[in-house]
Image: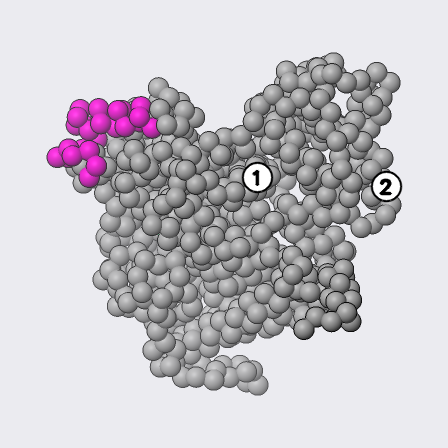
């Protein structure tokens, strides 16, 4: 019963925001776009003085989006309403924030910044101080409306990360033309390799029901410069090209368009047969070509700025031109010819391998290198960062720099298929950056992967979980993908700066928190490598679902789906000889790159088992033998996860909200348990070959090897099956 005293208490609780079920908790939905009021009084004063009103002339949906974001964001951050003034009709006040293009805003045209604007192209922006009619202020200016939108998000980022506005002179131009999220979302809403719930695209209620989440998705993407979205899985259902589904895709395209995001679709190469009723999908058959042309024309009637097709062909059971004795170029060109009149592109994936006896990591290069120059101009080849498959660490793919006549997309995996799903805290920017910065030596020393690409695609880690990505820190990987794609060619070591800005926007600007979280994030990728696949090991995860260790697994129907194929442990040693004495995959790299790995003695420890079969007693650069180093790495991995746990525990009283703190604490608990599992299982297994003891005095495995070998994981998320071994998609 509520008596007077209880009522007073209840009011007090509500006032103090202490009633968790009633007050809005920090659920992670707002991502890095939180816009909470700035607490530091001096900073608040500086910002309030610098920004009075917003001068805007919202002549397009994109400018509307920019102005909405700025009014909401600035009002939130400054803790007072920021008024939007129609920039055509008003005189400029001191502290006016001018936003727009010379075409949309008369005051901006009067700034005469033409020479600074020219190099910005279609997406770049300027943020600078101006003096106009004797008044001073800041202007966000671009050639295009979408450039203005990117500038608006950047400006908000400056405030969210507590940057000084005193001497702003920012010119920002994206390094890569295509910055695309690839959703592996199925039309039934399951997400292949997705660990954050169901697909955010609710195909069943589209096109009429437009979930507000679609707009928030577009805002988040635009805030980091992502300009494309492939809506459906590369293992594509032909149904996506039927009219009913095209109208659903069109509804999404309409929502994304103001945010500069073009929609792309993954297509199934057999579509002319399965939904077109043709007897063949042979790309050189005129009826097939006519079918694609008609279909593409139809798509553009739904989505006038449709981006194009993403195609997985002749890979892991998907149909493709080779079914008809045709080449990848023949297949891609048939689609490219249909798209060309509409300025659409084909993104053809290089992730191909067959169960041949050739080293799996050599196959994509061998198939595509001879085809360089045979593709139409509107075909891009999409190459995964490494030659195998999104491992915690692999060398860059030898295709980068090797097909100079083809524009390339670098494909990275944001979703953590091989990195502990959304259970493990692993900040992936260092992994992405390691690839971007790797020297291909394609045109002599100093030709990094970033200089060989036109775009970047990231396999999304987004689902309908309230916090979008499952793990609160997995959001950082979505964020970092966009930011890296925007500035791919700028100086190295962007990972730390990107982590810094993400933490400030997502958690806190408190220097202690920023420092601790940054240390954890920057160490986390190497930590995962240590407890999963140290020293160049790869693909020793559980069969099919890829969670947890299974280095012993050898039951798959194809050799190159088995972990034993990849690690090649025997009584002499461990590792895959890919040098001239082995598969010679090394030969696919430019001579300069080869020298890094060719000699077992010089090869960096972190890649040595990828390239060499190393004797158990051989000494590595660390001074330890292989066996000692393997033990050292697995033990360090576990210890480092425990270090992350300590860092996190120490934060609680210092300003992390209770909800996310608790979530991360629990997830770190899983990560610790999994790291121990990895260490014990792998060391016990490899010990059967090395026949050497585990380090004296170290924590000993609490189970036998047989126990680990018999563990069965049922219903692991992200796989189409229930965990019962299947014969495809290892
Ligand atoms: C592998 C995934 C599989 C994907 C494939 C691909 O296990 O689910 O279909 O990549 O990229 O990593 O096509």
Above or below, comparing residue 182 to residue 50 in the picture? below
Residue under label 1: 219
Q: Quadrant of residue 682?
A: bottom left
The quarter of the rendered structure image containing the C terminus is bottom left
Q: Which of the two labelled residues, at mark 1 and mark 2, occupies the earlier sequence position?
A: 2
Give the colouring mode of the picture.
one colour
In the rendered structure, the answer to whether residue 623 lies left or right of residue 417 reads right
**Residue in the image at 59% along x and 65% along y:** 663
Residue under label 2: 45
The total number of labels drawn is 2
In-front residue for pair 525/241: 241
Q: Position of residue 464 (x, y in %)?
A: 47, 52
| Magenta stretch: includes residue 108 | no
Above or below, comparing residue 348 to residue 425 in the picture? above
**Residue in the image at 63% along x and 40% along y:** 491
The magenta region covers 274-299
Q: Position of residue 330 (x, y in %)?
A: 25, 30
Secondary element at tag 2: helix
Q: Quadrant of residue 68?
A: top right
In the rendered structure, the answer to whether residue 595 lies left or right of residue 91 reads left
Q: Position of residue 48 (x, y in %)?
A: 82, 37
The quarter of the rendered structure image containing the N terminus is bottom right
């Amino acid at each position: 019963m509520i008596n007077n005293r209880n009522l007073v208490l209840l009011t007090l609780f509500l006032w103090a925001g202490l009633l968790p079920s009633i007050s809005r908790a920090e659920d992670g939905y707002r991502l890095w776009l939180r816009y909470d009021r700035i607490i530091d009084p001096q900073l608040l004063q500086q910002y309030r003085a610098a920004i009075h009103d917003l001068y805007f002339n919202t002549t397009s949906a994109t400018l509307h989006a920019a102005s909405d974001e700025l009014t909401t964001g600035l009002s939130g951050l400054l803790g007072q309403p920021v008024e939007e003034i129609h920039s055509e009709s008003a005189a400029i006040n001191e502290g006016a924030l001018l936003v727009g293009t010379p075409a949309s805003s008369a005051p901006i045209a009067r700034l005469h910044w033409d020479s600074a604007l020219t190099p910005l192209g279609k997406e770049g922006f300027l943020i600078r101080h101006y003096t106009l009619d004797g008044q001073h202020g800041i202007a966000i200016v671009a050639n295009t409306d979408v450039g203005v939108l990117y500038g608006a998000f950047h400006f908000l980022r400056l405030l969210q990360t507590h940057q000084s506005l005193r001497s702003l002179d920012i010119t920002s131009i994206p390094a890569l033309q295509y910055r695309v999220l690839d959703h592996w979302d199925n039309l039934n809403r399951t997400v292949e390799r997705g660990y954050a719930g169901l697909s955010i695209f609710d195909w069943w209620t589209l096109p009429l029901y437009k979930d507000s989440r679609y707009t928030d998705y577009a805002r988040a993407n635009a805030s980091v410069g992502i300009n494309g979205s492939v809506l459906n899985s590369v293992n594509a259902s032909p149904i996506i090209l039927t009219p009913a589904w095209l109208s659903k895709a069109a509804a999404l395209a309409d929502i994304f368009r103001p945010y500069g995001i073009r929609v792309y679709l993954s297509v199934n190469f057999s579509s002319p047969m399965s939904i077109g009723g043709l007897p063949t999908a042979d790309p050189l058959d005129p009826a097939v070509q006519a079918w694609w042309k008609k279909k593409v024309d139809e798509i553009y009637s739904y989505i006038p700025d449709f981006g194009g097709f993403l195609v997985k062909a002749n890979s892991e059971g998907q149909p493709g031109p080779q079914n008809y004795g045709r080449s990848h170029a023949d297949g891609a060109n048939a689609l490219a010819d249909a798209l060309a009149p509409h300025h659409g592109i084909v993104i053809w994936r290089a992730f191909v391998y067959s169960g041949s006896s050739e080293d799996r990591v050599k196959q994509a290069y061998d198939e595509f290198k001879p085809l360089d120059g045979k593709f139409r101009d509107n075909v891009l080849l999409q190459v995964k960062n490494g030659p195998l498959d999104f491992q915690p660490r692999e060398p860059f793919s030898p295709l980068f720099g090797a097909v100079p006549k083809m524009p390339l997309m670098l494909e990275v995996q944001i979703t953590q298929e091989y990195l502990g799903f959304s259970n493990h805290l692993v900040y992936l920017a260092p992994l992405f950056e390691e690839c971007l910065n790797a020297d291909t030596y394609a045109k002599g020393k100093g030709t990094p992967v970033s200089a060989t690409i036109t775009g970047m695609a990231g396999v999304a880690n987004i689902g309908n979980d309230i916090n979008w990505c499952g793990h609160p820190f997995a959001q950082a990987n979505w964020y970092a993908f966009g930011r890296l794609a925007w500035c791919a060619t700028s100086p190295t070591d962007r990972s730390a700066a990107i982590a810094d800005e993400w933490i400030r926007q997502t958690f806190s600007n408190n220097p202690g928190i920023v420092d601790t979280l940054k240390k954890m994030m920057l160490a986390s990728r190497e930590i995962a490598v240590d407890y999963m696949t140290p020293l160049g090991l790869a693909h020793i995860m559980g069969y099919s679902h890829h969670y947890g260790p299974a280095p012993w697994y050898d039951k798959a129907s194809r050799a190159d789906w088995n972990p034993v194929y990849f690690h090649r442990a025997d009584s002499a040693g461990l590792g895959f000889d890919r040098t001239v004495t082995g598969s010679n995959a090394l030969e696919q790299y430019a001579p300069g790159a080869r020298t890094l790995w060719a000699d077992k003695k010089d090869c960096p420890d972190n890649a040595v088992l990828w390239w060499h079969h190393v004797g158990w007693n051989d000494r590595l650069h660390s001074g330890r033998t292989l066996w000692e180093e393997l033990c050292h790495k697995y033990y360090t991995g576990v210890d480092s996860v425990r270090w992350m746990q300590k860092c996190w525990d120490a934060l609680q009283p210092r300003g992390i909200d209770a909800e996310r703190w608790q979530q991360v604490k629990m997830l770190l608990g899983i990560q610790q348990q999994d790291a121990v599992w990895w260490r014990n299982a792998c060391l016990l297994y490899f010990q059967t070959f090395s026949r050497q003891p585990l380090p004296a005095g170290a924590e000993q495995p609490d189970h036998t090897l047989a126990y680990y070998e018999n563990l069965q994981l049922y219903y692991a998320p992200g796989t189409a099956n229930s965990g019962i071994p299947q014969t495809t998609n290892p």
